Image (spheres, rainbow, N blue to C red):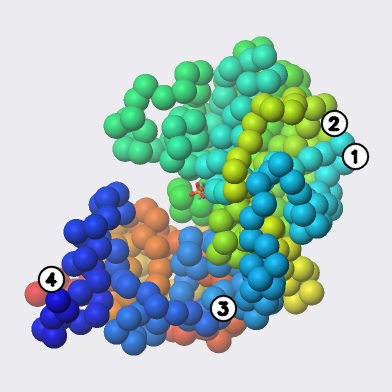
């Protein structure tokens, strides 16, 4: 019963509305295919993808290395359960420990998402015999009930209260507030090196070093949530790398699988790794051969193609070229590497996002005054320049009174 009066997009959006639980609201577009940093909708319109699946499509769309690795693996075996292991799973764990510079005795647990990696970290922290968790204001750690307790935004948490007990939130980047909140009942402090959902707010390296010192003194774990900031996103392998700290655990997901769903908890050193023993945690899909092959191809492409240096250069280029616009409505470009937000002087981000989409750019209005840009790590200077050049006209369109 297709109607000829509506476009393919409108038809699918109508059917979406009648068949999906509306937690995401109305989708902005119906997308069909992608190539590099570009995507096409079902009506044939092309967009420069500066959202990258929310910091997931690290290699962009349809990257030949990812396509080859996943195609080969699905033709051999996709899934085997964690009663068994595979060469790709073992190689991926070794590779993650190597890039994390994790000491002897460290280990990896594979999950399927960021929230599940956080759940594993929460369970790890319970094995200290303590139950307190300190997280930061502005934090986002996921939507499952455990992870949600650590997420700060009241609108996400309150409909589901009561959540996990013992969680407190302290102002981000405030060393004394953290020191005051951590004590003998604290199992873990959980922090993001860059708060992506808060609009690319960067942790001071001194704050992360203080967090390390405070948690060590209190006998609590320091868990760094690298779900968004990890795997090259900041121009280092991990967001905490620049601070020089050795955390007790990190969580990974988003960019790790380049679009295939994989998460990971990495524990540092044998004391922490030994907190979780046989039978205490598990996952049916976690780290199956298909996603492990995908993640291995992401990590080796980042290395072989020199993407860490590229990300640093592109991030600096984006920030400096937006600054060079000297636009009166733009405050700054916040963040590191390609985890960025254009901060606006007023609450224009939703309107700029609509104007951007109409002009062929996908961006994310992460806060009323901030537009998040988390494009593929492979994006080129010319592609970024297309957006920067268009930005003044997008802002002008956003400021036009509604017709
Ligand atoms: C996205 C995100 C999560 C949750 O990941 P999901 O895969 O959506 O469950 C957790 N922590 C951070 C820092 C994130 O950005």
Q: How far apart are marks 3 and 2 (CA)?
A: 39 Å
Residue at 33% of width from left, 62% of height from top?
A: 349
What residue would you read off at disc 1? 104
Q: Quadrant of residue 369?
A: bottom left
Indicate which disc, 3 or 2, sits on the residue closer to the N terminus.
3
What residue would you read off at disc 2? 270
Quadrant of the image containing the N terminus: bottom left
Image vertical order of residue 151 relative to residue 370, above or below: above
Indicate which disc, 1 or 2, sits on the residue closer to the N terminus.
1
Image coordinates for residue 111, horizontal then vertical, percent: 61, 45
User: Which label number is shown at residue 62?
Assistant: 3
Of helix, strand and loop, which one carries label 3? loop
Image coordinates for residue 8, horizontal then vertical, percent: 24, 80
Of helix, strand and loop, which one carries label 1? loop
What residue would you read off at disc 4? 402
Q: How far apart are marks 1 and 4 (CA)?
A: 61 Å
Of helix, strand and loop, which one carries label 2? helix
Image vertical order of residue 170 relative to residue 252, above or below: above
Image coordinates for residue 46, horizontal then vertical, percent: 39, 85
- State left or right for residue 18 relative to residue 23: left
Label 4 vs label 2, nearer the camera = 2
Q: Distance between the residues labelled 3 and 1?
A: 36 Å
Quadrant of the image containing the C terminus: bottom left
């Amino acid at each position: 019963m297709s109607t000829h009066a509506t476009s393919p997009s409108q038809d699918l959006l109508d059917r979406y509305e009648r068949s999906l639980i509306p937690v995401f609201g109305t989708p902005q577009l119906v997308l069909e295919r992608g190539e590099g940093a570009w995507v096409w909708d079902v009506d044939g319109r092309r967009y420069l993808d500066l959202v990258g699946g929310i910091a997931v499509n690290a290699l962009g769309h349809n990257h030949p290395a990812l396509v080859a690795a996943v195609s080969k693996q699905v033709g051999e075996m996709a899934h085997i359960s964690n009663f068994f292991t595979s060469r790709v799973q073992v190689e991926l764990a070794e590779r993650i420990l190597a890039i994390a510079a994790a000491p002897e005795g460290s280990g990896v647990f594979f999950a399927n998402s960021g929230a599940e990696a956080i759940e594993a970290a929460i369970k790890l922290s319970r094995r200290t015999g303590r139950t307190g968790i300190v997280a930061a204001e502005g934090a986002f750690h996921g939507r499952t009930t455990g992870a949600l307790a650590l997420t700060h935004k009241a609108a996400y948490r309150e409909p589901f209260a009561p959540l996990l007990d013992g969680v407190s939130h302290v102002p981000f980047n405030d060393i004394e507030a953290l020191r005051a909140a951590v004590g003998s009942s604290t199992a873990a402090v959980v922090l993001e090196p860059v708060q992506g959902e808060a609009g690319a707010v960067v942790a001071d390296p001194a704050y992360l070093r203080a967090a390390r010192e405070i948690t060590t003194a209190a006998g609590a774990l320091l868990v760094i949530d690298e779900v968004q900031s990890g795997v090259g996103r900041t121009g280092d392998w991990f967001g905490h790398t620049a601070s020089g700290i050795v955390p007790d655990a990190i969580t990974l997901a988003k960019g790790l699988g380049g679009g295939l769903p994989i998460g990971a908890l990495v524990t540092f050193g044998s004391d922490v790794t030994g907190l979780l023993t046989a039978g205490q945690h598990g996952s049916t899909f976690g780290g199956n051969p298909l996603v492990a092959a995908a993640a291995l191809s992401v990590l080796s492409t980042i290395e072989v193609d020199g993407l860490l240096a590229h990300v640093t250069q592109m991030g600096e280029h984006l920030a400096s070229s937006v600054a060079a616009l000297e636009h009166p409505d733009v405050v700054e470009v916040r963040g590191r590497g390609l985890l960025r937000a254009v901060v606006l002087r007023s609450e224009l981000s939703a309107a700029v996002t609509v104007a951007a989409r109409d002009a062929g750019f996908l961006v994310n209005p992460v806060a009323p005054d901030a537009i998040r840009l988390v494009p593929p790590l492979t994006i080129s200077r010319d592609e970024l320049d297309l957006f920067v050049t268009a930005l003044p006209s997008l802002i002008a369109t956003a400021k036009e009174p509604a017709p």
